Image: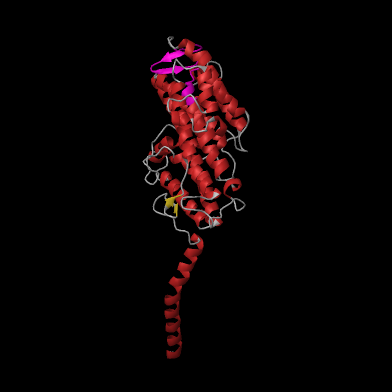
Amino acid sequence: MKTTKFIISILSIFVLIFTPSCEKDNENDNNNDVNAPLTYSFDRGGESTVSFSGQTAKLEMAEELMNALNSESSSKDLLNQMFNDGTGFSNDMLNTSGKNIAGKTATSSVASATVKIQFDNFINEFVDDVIPNFSNTASPGMAGTIGSRHVSSKGLEYNQAFGKGLIGAMCVDQIVNNYLTQTKIGDNVDNESSDLSAGEYTSIEHHWDEAFGYVYGREEDETSPMLGVGVLYNKYLNKVNSSNEPGIATEIYDAFKLGRAAIVASNSDVRDNQAEILRKKVSRVIAHKASDYLFEGAAKMSEGDWAGCLHSLSEGYGFILSLQFTYNDNGVPYFSNSEVNNMLDQLMEGNGFWDRSTAELEEMGNQILSVL
């Protein structure tokens, strides 16, 4: 009996000594020995390798273009120049950047060719329908001004539809369907760094940074993002993080950090896992805001606040357009191009927003919310 107890005691000590070590090994296997830095900061030879100046330029262009889509003095030539050519801006650095928004709007393999036409139509209809009626009071079937808003005969505020549409068709499409795909960050893409000089980056490092730039490109310091910056994705990530889904901003930032660290460490498993997290998390912001603005529009309609209602529904219209560029748990958009266009057509039936009911808006909002 004493011998048996002695053997059991020895075995217990053995388990206590070796079990923590085994657990630690398993944790290391799961993390693949990649450690994210405290901030999005990466260097080579003491010089930063993070570069996304092109994304910053396009985000700044979008801001000025949205303002121009609310100005009576704008012309088709100027608006098309800003959108398609990347010139005509008040900031000369943008005019000489060699960048443009249209070239990155709905250009992934997921995107439909119909989408760019919709953005072109926003410009044409603003100039043809809204500008000539700036002095009119907007009403069903009549373009004009309501409150401080300038809307079409169907109540659509074009700068809002354009801007919120760009969040999906440019920012999310480029992040989710371009830069974070295997075409841009897969093992067949150059990630050899042995011959690089200080501050130089590999192709994969740069592609990852470009995806990062569509979220944080207007931040004063990307190593300490404040959120709510600019007029595109960053602004609405902040809103969703503050209400619908607290913590999502941290999850997105942490995934960007760990994925970039994995690229430096040439660890494709961690890189791909973080890309998958990002594609799904980034997409959730679009669905939240599309439904939010439909519910908000319905509430303002019930209150008789038509200026506020049309503004909210115009934002919702743009976010609905953006839904086709998202990525769900099954690896496809929340809604297809045809499903999105069906929703947009429903909103524009008859006199457009003026003819909608709160029940219609809430039903569509719940339909979108159900995908989350």
Q: Residue at x 43, y 51 (%)?
A: 47
Q: Give the number of callouts.
A: 0
* Magenta stretch encompasses residue 157: yes
- Image height of 54 relative to 141, above or below: below
Can residue 341 be seen here? The reply is no
Point out residue 344 in the picture as x, y percentages from the top left corner. 56, 25
- Image height of 133 relative to 316, above or below: above
Asked which colour scheme the image uses, the reply is secondary structure
Point out residue 190 in the picture as x, y percentages from the top left corner. 58, 51
Can residue 94 be seen here? The reply is yes
**Which contiguous range is marked in magenta?**
138-161
- Image height of 252 relative to 228, above or below: below
Q: Residue at x 60, y 31 (%)?
A: 339
Q: Quadrant of the N terminus?
A: bottom left
* Magenta stretch encompasses residue 264: no
Point out residue 173 in the picture as x, y percentages from the top left corner. 55, 37
Tell me which corner region of the image, top left, top right, bottom left or bottom right, holds residue 329.
top right
Point out residue 51 in the picture as x, y percentages from the top left corner. 47, 44
Left or right of 323: which side holds 233? left
Left or right of 106: which side holds 46? left
Left or right of 36: which side holds 170? right
Q: Residue at x 37, y 39 (%)?
A: 220
